[in-house]
Image: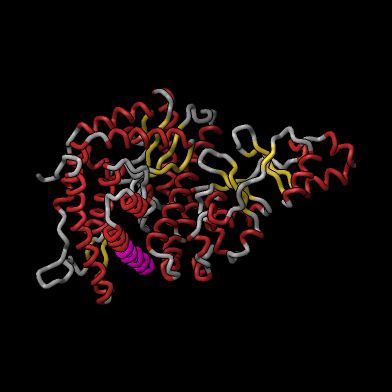
Amino acid sequence: MEIDALDRIDSFPYRHRVCDVMTAPLATVGAEVSGIDAARRMTAAKISSLVVADDAGKPLGIVTERDLLRAFSADGSSKMENANVSDLMAAPVFTVAENDYVFIAMGRIERRGIRHLVVVDDAGRAVGMVTPRGLLKVRVGDTLRLGDEIDAALDAHDLGLVRTQLPGLARQLLAENVGALGAASVISAVYCDLTRRAWDFAVAALQDEGKGAPPAPYSVLVLGSGGRGESLLKPDQDNAIVHLGDAHADIWFKDAAERMNATLDAAGVPFCKGKVMASNADWRRSLEGWRQEIGRWVKSHDPEALLMTDIFFDLKRAAGDSGPAEQLHEVALKAVHGSVTFLHAIGLKLDAYVAPIGMLGKIKTVDNRIDLKLNGLLPITAGVRVMALQHGLALTSTSERLKGLATRGALSENDERQLTDALEVLLCAVLNQQATDIEAGLEPSTHVDVRRLDARRQHLIKQAFKTAEGLKLLVRDSLGKSGVVPGG
């Protein structure tokens, strides 16, 4: 897809999830149901299809009116009377995750040429249906193939072509008033899918070489900003693996992780300079190994252990089974929630932050630029993370954590709004600068040229700095209610 094609985009598919547009509840039947009974159920419910599911609710296939009519026309009613839906259904069934963006579903329907796309939850259970007719509200065009191009990719080069389209997509989403938080969420979703596809390549290669399938249940994780859904346009790799295998199984996962990391690097998502990658044994462990490591972090006050919290606790599953990721997240939350000393140590890091505003009220810069990640985004995401961990919130995005804290009364509605607005302003400035730099052939960074910002935008950024500075007082107060006062 040409980058220019993004100019014709309708932002709806990039702002809404599949669960927002799917038809639910879903009509399902067991594989043993007869074709005649299936036809009666469709007629009674005035629907055109039934999903055939197993006892756990996972889709096995789909049977449509057309399938039934073909069976009847070809063999007469006698076959219909004796056949079960398992004999008539189309299988395997194409699916999409309920939390995927709509553009993923649209691309999949268009590329596969199908009329019914089954929606599944994190456990793989069928929960809804998406059809072309149901998506008429969204304008279908060539630009909507972006998500499914990842699934169609055959190598790192193909994945790289998808990645190069992100600056144009981000620019258009901002122009469509989707907002920086929404744009960053879409970018994160694409990077997460790139990670998943790179993992698919690794697994397939190992199987082709006779090294077998994954030897134990596992989850491939995206960490940091990608896990929060707040990615910018030039992230490096932050990923990990948790598996339920032993040391021998870890040898297989090491091989697969090295291939995945190499593929992502070749696709333009560079190796992490801090080696936060699943190919590094420190970021690839069994569930029990992670339990022990997290326990060490909580008991330790050394800077390296505290740095891990900035990355690890913002995790999201990118590939593999949902179970290990969920278990790991639960283990981590419980370990930290019960350790006020550890939360104190994290909170102390925020005390060093001072709003980068000079005596005359101007933004402090170096060569007319300021690092908005270091001077704004990090203090906000870190401060909100501390409070979320303190209150045991199983949420990863900063905006969702803010909502959760406000719901619990840990933040006022005004504080929630100001912090969300600050995050939006800072993300917007960085994304626009990165898109501009990429168009100019420059290496994108989080350093924003203040000369590009009008007076209003500079004022909003200064307000965001002040909000970030005020957050450390909110964190101090919150931890103080737990008997811990950072810096006290």
Q: In the displayed structure, does residue 92 sit left or right of residue 76?
A: left
The residue at 16%/41% (across/down) is 484
Residue 461 vertical position relative to residue 349 in the rendered view, above or below: below
Q: Point out the image quarter for the C terminus.
A: top left
The residue at 83%/43% (across/down) is 71
Find the residue positioned furthest to the bottom: 455
- Residue 84 location, quadrant: top right
Q: Is residue 53 magenta?
A: no
Q: How is the image coloured?
A: secondary structure
Find the residue positioned furthest to the front: 409
Residue 19 vertical position relative to residue 430 in the rendered view, above or below: above
Residue 39 percent across, percent down from the top left = 79, 44
> In terms of secondary structure, what is the magenta stretch mainly?
helix
Q: Nearer the viewer, residue 263 or 106?
A: 106
The residue at 69%/38% (across/down) is 29
Let me know if residue 261 appears in the view.
yes
Q: In the displayed structure, does residue 453 sit left or right of residue 132?
A: left
Residue 293 vertical position relative to residue 35 in the rendered view, above or below: above
> Magenta part of the protein: which range?
423-442
Q: Is residue 427 magenta?
A: yes
Q: Point out the image quarter for the N terminus.
A: bottom right
The residue at 20%/49% (across/down) is 475
Let me know if residue 270 appears in the view.
no
Residue 429 percent across, percent down from the top left = 31, 66
Q: In the displayed structure, does residue 25 sit left or right of residue 268?
A: right
